[in-house]
Image (cartoon, coloured by chain):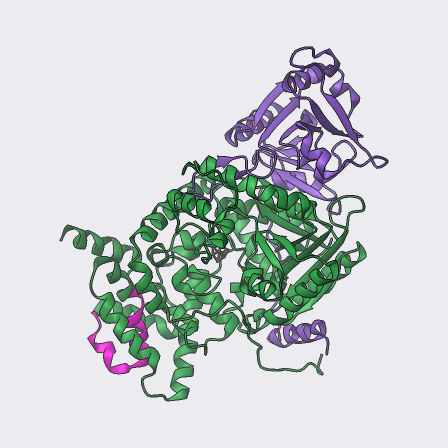
Amino acid sequence: MSGTFLGMPVFGTGNLNATEPFPTAAHRELGNAQLRANLGHATHTIRDKRLKVVSELPDWEDLRNAGSAIKENVMARLPELLETFEANFTARGGIVHWARDAREANEIVTALIRATGETEVVKVKSMATQEIGLNEHLESQGIEAFETDLAELIVQLDRDKPSHILVPAIHKNRSQVRDIFLREMPGVDPALTNEPARLAEAARKHLRRKFLSAKVAVSGANFGLADTGTLAVVESEGNGRMCLTLPETLITVMGIEKLLPTFTDLEVFMQLLPRSSTGERMNPYTSLWTGVTPDDGPQNVHLVMLDNGRTAALADGMGRSALHCIRCSACMNVCPVYERTGGHAYGSTYPGPIGAILSPLLTGITSEENASLPYASSLCGACFDACPVKINIPEILVHLRGVDVDSRRRAVKVPSEMDLMMKGAQWAFSSGKHLGLLEKGLPLGRLAAGRDKLIKKLPGHLAGGWTQSRDIPAPPSQSFRHWWAANRETKEQA
Amino acid sequence: MSARDDILARIASALRDAPVAPAIPRDYRRATALTGEQRLAQLVDRLEDYKANVAVVPAAAAAVTVAQLLAGASSIVVPEGLPSSYLSALADLTDDGGAPAVLVDSPARRLTVAQLDAVDAVVTAAAVAVSETGTIILDGSPDQGRRIISLVPDRHVCLLTMDQVVEVLPEAIALLDPTRPQTWISGPSATSDIELERVEGVHGPRTLDVIVLS
Ligand code: SF4
């Protein structure tokens, strides 16, 4: 391989960049009391369910160890596994396309839809298509994409953005959902109540005709199994089955990191994912398909394998394990920062602790807004404990802070707009007990890194924790959770 | 350079530190520790937890149980490979308009989406079931049929035999043919998208009846 071009990493594009620095966005989102109440309820409920079903399995740690090793294996053998997957999927009648970035993926999908002559497609919830901004692109090309997952439908009808990768409408309560349906769903019963069962029924009616007449579906994939060329989609509502079964044409967009070496490896991941994600022993429906099955399901089956910055993340030896993520969202549900700010504050498609490392790895840390993401954490370590594939998120956060600081030092710049915003944010955060949390975890660290003089003004235990962990990824001397618990008690009594 | 070659070259460049592919420790449970009776009890418990209806009956009572469940249905669909013995008691139904019409989906005569949307229920067999997770797996064999027939009707009646019930997922994986289209079913369709309150019945069959033949 001596002839291989050893180029610079090529970063990803699309909905991966924050449109504003994390502190600014977090400050605005913290002002939304409804959001905070909904999020608090939701994250606590899922967290409790998760703990219950995880503690049922005597071999949970063995499954995590297997899952972590399998993913490390995938990264080390990625070229070989991609080629094996492609050969197997193709041998069974599927067609594989490769996309370097968001633009290329969008163009491939658009051309495939155009070739069918259709102007409407149904979609299963997919983070990859959200990352590349597929719906917006299709709209600009005169193709309408209907989201069919209930939460995605709510968000799409309200022209909003998902705030959680598992329950994208976690920031809306039942009455808000009813209002959106009454306003946006043609032919909806005006007497619709806010009972979740009635709302789900309204969604069923609304989408049923679409499913039964759809000619083209677009999906993501949870797993691609290299040794058999099989794709898997994990879901709850049956909208996935509808999209994967009824249309004539199926177009799947999958990141290149989603492979598992063998069909057998599914036995590990289908134990880890549902329990970590929804806190269920198993999700209601999982569909597996291998290319085309004659006489059963779509006969025109395509797969777009997406890079969009994944190879850049892979090139970072310390950060590469962020690509092990199976998008279960457990790290978000245990994160004290996420619980208060919600997913929107992270800007990118990928929020929470994993987003704080994955987004800058995909786009490059030099992107000004995403450079603030590795500071959106208190390094408390709860995410690492919860992660089913054992991604050491705190270690990668610290590593990325170091990368950011180094790139700033090299640039020798005067205080940037970013620094000034951070300063403003610091002031804003310093009032209010919820804001206090972020103040400790986030902007001070940023200032400490960027402007040496200010470090001395930091409270001792925080500055100590920060400077110790900046260059070497050692855990902070005092666990943030302990500090937070003690601190909250004092504040709430006050 | 094609996108494919370009991406593969980027990966090769990214991996120039030559990370080792670690051995995979498979210390998790890969075989059952339960008796058949215990597995059955576990399967029933888990399916009921998902709000599926479960009946455990002797094999000889399969037809009667199916007929009881489908009393009142005006039409049902079955895959052509479903044992006809499962349906033999339907003709005895006399209440509520009598025996339902039975539509058979076969390679020679494929039902349309509209026909499937009009039936009241589908009756299928299954490939394997996992008691620990309450999961039934269909693989498109002739007694289970095309994926569409177990999806569009609003009610799914699924028959299993005791010897198809394993305890842990790895046992089921070892029995499955990966290249067949598979549907793993753990209860009726459900959503928790509104305030995390679980609601059974969205787009897939809203009622799941499982009959285990002991
Ligand atoms: S980083 Fe781990 S815990 Fe977070 S979403 Fe990914 S797999 Fe789940």
Name the quarter where the N terminus of chain A is drawn: bottom right
Residue A450 in the image: state x and y as whole percent. Answer: 32, 80
Is A183 in front, or is A326? A183
Q: Which residue is painted at 33% across and 68% down in the image? A: A23
Q: Is residue A456 magenta?
A: yes
User: Most prominent secondary structure in the magenta stretch?
Assistant: helix
Q: How many marks?
A: 0
Is A359 in front, or is A471? A359
Residue B106 in the image: state x and y as whole percent. Answer: 82, 34
Q: Which residue is painted at 41% across and 73% down in the image? A: A369
Give the magenta part as a residue range. A441-459
Which chain is represented by green in the image? A
Q: Which residue is painted at 41% across and 36% down in the image? A: A193
Residue A163 in the image: state x and y as whole percent. Answer: 43, 56
Q: Which residue is painted at 46% across and 63% down in the image? A: A355
Is A191 in front, or is A164? A191
Residue B174 in the image: state x and y as whole percent. Answer: 70, 42
| Corner quadrant of residue B71 | top right
Which chain is represented by purple in the image? B
Q: Does the magenta stretch include residue B161?
A: no
| Corner quadrant of residue B30 | top right
